[in-house]
Amino acid sequence: MRRDVIHSLLVANRGEIACRVFRTCRDLGITTVAVYSDADADALHVREADLAVRLPGAAPADTYLRGDLVVAAALAAGADAVHPGYGFLSENAAFAAAVQEAGLVWVGPPVKAIELMASKTRAKELMAGAGVPLLAPVDPATAGEGDLPLLLKAAAGGGGRGMRIVRELTDLPPELQAASAEAASAFGDGEVFAEPYVERGRHVEVQVMADAHDTVWALGTRDCSLQRRHQKVIEEAPAPGLDDSLRERLHEAAVAAARAVGYRGAGTVEFLVSAEGRPYFLEMNTRLQVEHPVTEAVFGLDLVALQLRVAEGEPLPAPTPPQPAGHAVEARLYAEDPARDWQPQTGTLLALEVPGAPGLRLDAGYTGGDTIGVHYDPMLAKVIAHAPTRPEAVRLLARALERARIHGPVTNRDLLVRSLRHPDFAAARLDTGFYDRHLADLTAPGPGDPATAALAAALAEAVRRTGLAEAVRPGLATGAVRPGSAAGAVRPGSATGAVRPPGAAAGAVQPGALTAAGPPPVRFGAWRNVPSGPQLKRYRSEPDGAEHEVAYRTPRTGAPEPYEAPGVRVLAVRPDRVTLELDGVTRHFTVTTDPGADRVHVDTPGASYTFTALPRFTDPATHTAPGSLLAPMPGTVVRVADGLAAGAAVEAGQPLIWLEAMKMEHRILAPASGTLTALHAVPGHQVEVGALLAVVQEDPAPAPVPEETA
């Protein structure tokens, strides 16, 4: 059998997965080649690679989805192999064929296997012949009340694109149209099919690894039930709560699926498991999965290294996989705001630091100072914890996320911590409706103490303004924070170490931190001219918008002290660190000011806060006209409602405009019933955050009926 030794590898992808593959290549002595769009010119994966080739343009359709440009880049850089990563062209049979036709080694499954599994409808027919359990398809044209609820899915897609849940027959035609349009936009194929939607179903999958020597491994199960918009958020291995017979049935079905298509390399067979414990085949992903690190942790394997080994024609190391050990949980850290319909966030990531500990791993596509743009998926990193038991792994991961320093755009970090500590998750009561039921509670204001954090920010700024390196006053007076009080338990201590994504072996934990370098912090204005008198500092916390007013004074000694409230004593103040005694408990606050901005981040061992400094007096500003629909994030207008034009009547909650940003589609809804008086959104146009898309003039309320005539 032919042996192809790989010396130089191009990764046809970006971000976290490109960095992940490069890490293994460095361990194996393989030269790495990156491709990058103009938007990614200074991205982490470009900095990590030995060589890099530009793909002109910014949009994925012009860059990472151009297979011809990627193949040309590999040849230009002298690469002899291509790894597709996940997403983009990773499951594109034509691209796999083009790579091999160019004389390059394809680090993926056979082209025929990709073709057979590329369409979910054809894959289900094939799996039925292999004896894999399936949900019966439903013809949307003949669907009745008894078929509800239905799940619409894109035949050629994944990642939740083109997927809709239909609970009312009247909703079926418009949802079919919307699903088809999204599928065509995302995958170039508008085919959509329907199947029964299983309430409270679990998403359970099996990792397979196969070689060209008739060996197929089933590497345990993973549970990926915690999802938002049908995209995974938290994954774990092994899937908890499965009995031995169900686990064995899933393994056997996954191996049968792989053998049915002559599979080679890494792949994942996904199942829906009903509340009664019945499994149904969903699809086979003919690539490496985002959540592969939890399987690596439990089995002690490097799946990328095995992919390369199989691509070189070598057999797997043994006829059966190693024995699993322990439990692993992975959380995906996204730049998004879960409390605002999961809106993706953009901007500069000033710091990304996760405290290091045995069993922790960080796979990241960004580091401090990088820019999070609008063109790509909002995932920043994955944090993985491995421990002997599930409760230990969950606790380790939650604490690591809680202590992480993440400065910049809003992220889902707090949601992840609360999800991991939710009673249903702790008890392994898992299903795909978890966030539908619990999102409001998981995003409600927490038990933290932002008022005291704002006090720490003000004291640190006062020291910075005076030029002192540190102010230590063990006998300092008590302080005041308005509104609120210094309450809420915060454990003493601080983060001492971090997991670094670049340059580390798979699963490796190194001391240190990812930090953002920049110019010295700016100084806030609006200070009182009499420093010994009480001064006020106003902050607005993000993302909730609550305002906090801090009272303090700066005596002639130059050391700032809080003003007029019992229970708070200052022990030490530096421009970057404040130590307070709160009701007899010593607590530490790390303070970081954004370069060039009036934003300050305060990290404690139990919570993190971001504030914007406000002027002392309200600054009158122009207000947007009532009924204005503003772009909630930068993105591209993909379509507007049929027949929508100025003068049209609209109903409250009616979808008017569809905006695509960071691989997600967002609907802009009418805020009230009324008349559309202006429409500025044009399909295909890019808009910035806050851009005026349309204006709806609300219908006047009916005049009240006099009581005597009612």
Image (cartoon, grey):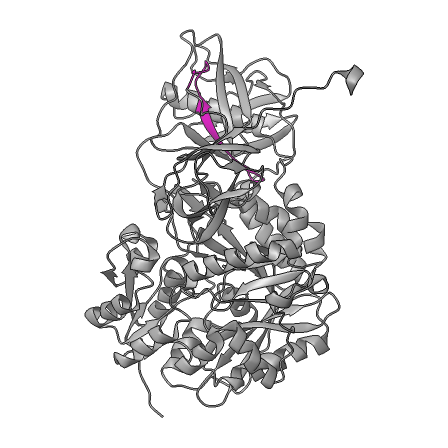
Image location (x, y in percent) of residue 509: 46, 58
- Residue 634 quadrant: top left
Image location (x, y in percent) of residue 132: 62, 80
Q: From the viewer's perspective, is residue 393 above or below residue 576?
A: below
View extreme (left): residue: 76
User: Residue 319: within the magenta?
Assistant: no
View extreme (front): residue: 709
Q: How many marks do you count on the picture?
A: 0
Quarter occupied by the N terminus: bottom left
Q: Is residue 514 visible in this depiction of the protein? A: no
Q: Main secondary structure of the magenta part?
A: loop
Residue depicted at x 46% and y 15%: 618
- In the drawing, does residue 232 fall left or right of residue 4? right
View extreme (right): residue: 708
Image location (x, y in percent) of residue 351: 41, 43
Q: From the viewer's perspective, is residue 495 above or below residue 82?
A: above
User: Residue 610: within the magenta?
Assistant: yes
Q: In this orientation, which residue lies closer to the viewer: 87 or 564?
A: 87
View extreme (bottom): residue: 1
Q: Is residue 34 visible in this depiction of the protein? A: yes
Q: In this orientation, which residue lies closer to the viewer: 121 or 710?
A: 710
Image location (x, y in percent) of residue 122: 52, 77
The segment highlighted magenta reads 604-621
- Residue 196 quadrant: bottom right
- In the drawing, does residue 489 fall left or right of residue 99? right
Q: In this orientation, which residue lies closer to the viewer: 316 or 276?
A: 276
Quarter occupied by the C terminus: top right
- In the drawing, does residue 110 fall left or right of residue 272? left
Q: In this orientation, which residue lies closer to the viewer: 337 or 484?
A: 337
